[in-house]
Amino acid sequence: MRGASGAGLPVIVFDAQPTSAEEQFELFHDTTAPVFDTLPSGSPADFSAQATDYLVGDVVISRIAHAPQSMRRSIRHIRCGSEDALAVLVYRRGRVDLSFDRTEMTLDSQHVGIIDLARSFYAACTDIDSVWAVIPRRRLRASLGRSPCARLHRDSPRGRVLRSTVISVWNRLPNASAEDATTLAQEIIDATQSVLTDGDFAPSDTALAVAMSDFVIAHLDDLDLDARMLARTFHCSRSTLFRIFAPHGGVAAYIRDARLDRCLDELLEPYESTRTVHQIATRWGFENPSHFHRLFTTRYGTPPSTARGTRHAPPGRAYDQDTSKKINTFHQWATR
């Protein structure tokens, strides 16, 4: 286990890979002992675990991956533990079955969970990869009420916003500075607050922008993707959509540019050389060859036939070859 900070955020990394599986489990057990009692579900000889914890202001954001095991949080941990807090759980892989006093809940990659760390529980985990955000209760105006936990489907408006916010913040932590901590923590807090608040769902424009960007990128191959689909998916008004996407020329322009980025990515790939430029353009909704040629040339400063197979983005390309850069650019606007 090692820690670091420097100009970035304070971080602790648990990686016991060079040691034996039995030693990894002992180290993991000792490291997590203040929070949980842990027990491997199979033989300790098959155990493995990795964890990275960032201190983001007073919010702890962690990515944890480990082999199947069970965990128990008892009254002893709660009384001897740190600050009273809620935890937001996003599972990228695997499943956990949680048992509280009178409540049971299963979380997997299709759900986002919020649990009250002031309540004791038992958790049976498969092989998992998850991101946790632990938020001091004093930072939240809303709460879980009497319930020890809440589960949101990842495709619900609340689930989309909370999941996208947590993953977006996590992805930016390695390059974040200490000065970014307040803003990053507040993004997590605001999204969680909006999810826990009763009544109409009213997330911040920042949280909506990140979730909508993720949704657009994931649904670019759906030719019905438009402002109406976004409004239905996120239960928001068209005026909200137009306000969020105004810096990018509107929803249609943002979707068009993202699809042009996909076209460029495929034109740059040698394994796509058997497909014509028109076939690639049509796949992403550009049926008119001359219209596509004009849009592509305007955006990247070179015609699609010239870009094909070069493995290098043309000089006028607005974004890096990795289309996730487009999300980052949009997010930088949303959080400025």
Image (cartoon, rainbow, N blue to C red):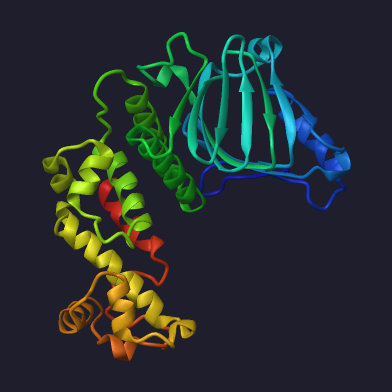
Whole-percent x and y of residue 116? 53, 18
Say above or below: 223 vs 192: below
Whole-percent x and y of residue 231? 21, 42
Say above or below: 308 vs 330: below
Which residue appears at 52% of the width and 51% of the height?
Answer: 174
Which residue appears at 42% of the width and 47% of the height?
Answer: 168
Say above or below: 278 vs 141: below
Say above or below: 251 vs 264: above
Relative to 80, 283 lies left or right: left
Relative to 262, 9 lies left or right: right
Which residue appears at 84% of the width and 35% of the height?
Answer: 26
Is residue 286 among the parts visible in the rendering? yes
Which residue appears at 27% of the width and 39% of the height?
Answer: 234
Between residue 155 and residue 214, name the one nearer to us. 155
- Locate the N terminus by quadrant: top right
Relative to 192, 22 lies left or right: right
Is residue 336 among the parts visible in the rendering? no
Total numbered circles: 0
Whole-percent x and y of residue 209? 28, 46
Residue at the left extreme? 239
The image quadrant that residue 117 belongs to is top right
Whole-percent x and y of residue 247? 17, 55
Between residue 228 and residue 89, name the one nearer to us. 228
